[in-house]
């Protein structure tokens, strides 16, 4: 406990999600907030007052030189994720927690992963929904064979693919045990709303520029990911996704999983009316069998995420929960998102692995429709 209390944490970026990170560190109680970074002096000062942070900096490099923190949370906009992660690893940070998505392009993601590996740092990405009880129990039901062989997974969420769809793709992989993907096919709605509600994440910037968090976005997307078949299976499961303007109103990160012997439903945010967060229908009683509510234990996924990072730093190796949020897994999510966007831009099926080097939507601004990466199987 004494060593845990000595861990010093720096938070880079002082917006809404940074506050969630800071609150989780404070609640954990085994590390202390030592520094915060934001180029907006007022934002940094407000953050410092709220969480009792002793020092603020306008630049992450100056902070790293002066503070040499043990743990760094990177809560900047996605295009600005790579530099703080790479520099924190080089400065000796033992643990790095980066918000999702990992990056905006695959080369940037690979540079971040390489830097953390060279430094031996525990490198996690904020896909904390993997630690929520409803998704964990859904995964356990699927893995136990309660649904038989999984045939189809359907997921919906609001927002754009890079910002919100990264959770959706990550959870689909998680529910299925992180299988490799064979190909992606998608279409996008390129029309955008006139304005977004100014209270949402990243919407003030969108209303001024039609770009969210500094990167190009689409209005909605629909498509599928075909996963490779498991050992002995004739075909792999297919993940069908709907996001943004293309999504039906089932909730944020809502899933239905169809198997040969049953199905389950995981409610997105908010809960699905009066229904339980997690329900299962076993086919033993026929297709019209009753749905069973699955009871869930209390859960604070952000606290579990921060706790896993601190546990891993103290242990000198990732814990099982930290391994679930490993940056390498987030890189696989980013590849799927970018492949979906590439499929929409190029109007073709994209085989995986993909060798994309750009953010495909930027090609729309340039009037381009071809890509240098991703081939049909």
Image (cartoon, rainbow, N blue to C red):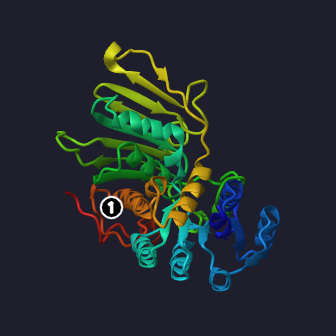
Q: Is residue 283 left or right of residue 292?
A: left
As drawn, is 49 to the left or to the right of 8? Answer: right
Residue 221 at x, y = what percent?
44, 49
Residue drawn at (56%, 73%), measured in percent from left and top? 80
**Quadrant of the image for the N terminus?**
bottom right
Residue 255 in view: no
Q: Is residue 283 above or below residue 228?
A: above
Residue at 48 percent across and 72 percent down: it is 121
Q: Name the foreground residue: 172 vs 204.
A: 172
Q: Position of residue 79 (x, y in %)?
A: 54, 71
Q: Dot 1: few (<14), some (14–19), or many (≥20) neighbours within 10 Å?
A: some
Camera-side residue: 316 or 85? 316
Specify the quadrant of the image occupied by residue 23.
bottom right
Q: What residue did someone put label 1 on?
A: 346
Q: Position of residue 290 (x, y in %)?
A: 44, 15
- Residue 150 appears in view: yes
At mark 1, the secondary structure is helix
Which residue is at a point 42% across and 50% down the rendered structure image? 169
Q: Is residue 315 above or below residue 296?
A: below
């Amino acid at each position: 406990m004494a060593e845990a209390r000595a861990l010093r944490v720096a938070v880079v970026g002082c917006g809404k999600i940074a506050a969630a990170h800071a609150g989780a560190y404070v609640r954990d109680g085994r590390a202390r907030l030592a520094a915060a970074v934001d180029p907006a002096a007022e934002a940094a000062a407000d953050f410092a007052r709220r969480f009792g942070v002793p020092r603020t900096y306008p630049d992450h490099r100056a902070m790293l030189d002066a503070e040499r923190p043990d743990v760094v949370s990177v809560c900047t906009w996605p295009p600005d994720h790579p530099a703080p992660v790479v520099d924190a690893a080089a400065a000796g940070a033992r643990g790095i927690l980066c918000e999702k998505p990992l990056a905006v392009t695959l080369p940037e993601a690979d540079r971040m992963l390489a830097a953390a590996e060279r430094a031996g740092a525990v490198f996690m990405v904020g896909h904390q929904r993997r630690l929520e009880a409803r998704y964990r129990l859904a995964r356990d039901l699927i893995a136990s064979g309660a649904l038989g062989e999984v045939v189809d997974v359907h997921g919906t969420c609001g927002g754009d693919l890079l910002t919100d769809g990264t959770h959706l793709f990550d959870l689909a992989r998680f529910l299925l045990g992180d299988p490799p993907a064979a190909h992606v096919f998608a279409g996008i709605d390129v029309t955008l709303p006139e304005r977004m509600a100014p209270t949402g994440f990243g919407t003030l910037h969108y209303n001024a520029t039609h770009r969210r968090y500094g990167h190009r976005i689409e209005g909605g997307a629909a498509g599928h990911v075909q996963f490779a078949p498991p050992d002995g299976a004739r075909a792999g499961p297919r993940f069908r996704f709907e996001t943004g303007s293309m999504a039906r109103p089932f909730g944020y990160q809502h899933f239905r999983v169809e198997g040969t012997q049953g199905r389950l439903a995981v409610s997105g945010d908010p809960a699905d009316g009066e229904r339980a967060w997690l329900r299962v229908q076993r086919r033993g009683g026929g297709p019209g069998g009753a749905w069973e509510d699955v009871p869930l234990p209390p859960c604070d996924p952000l606290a579990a995420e921060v706790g896993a990072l601190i546990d891993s730093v103290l242990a000198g190796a990732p814990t099982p929960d930290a391994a679930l949020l490993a940056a390498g897994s987030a890189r696989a999510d980013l590849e799927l998102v970018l492949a979906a966007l590439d499929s929409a831009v190029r109007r073709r099926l994209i085989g995986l692995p993909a060798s994309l080097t750009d953010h495909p939507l930027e090609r729309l601004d340039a009037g381009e429709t071809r890509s240098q990466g991703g081939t049909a199987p």
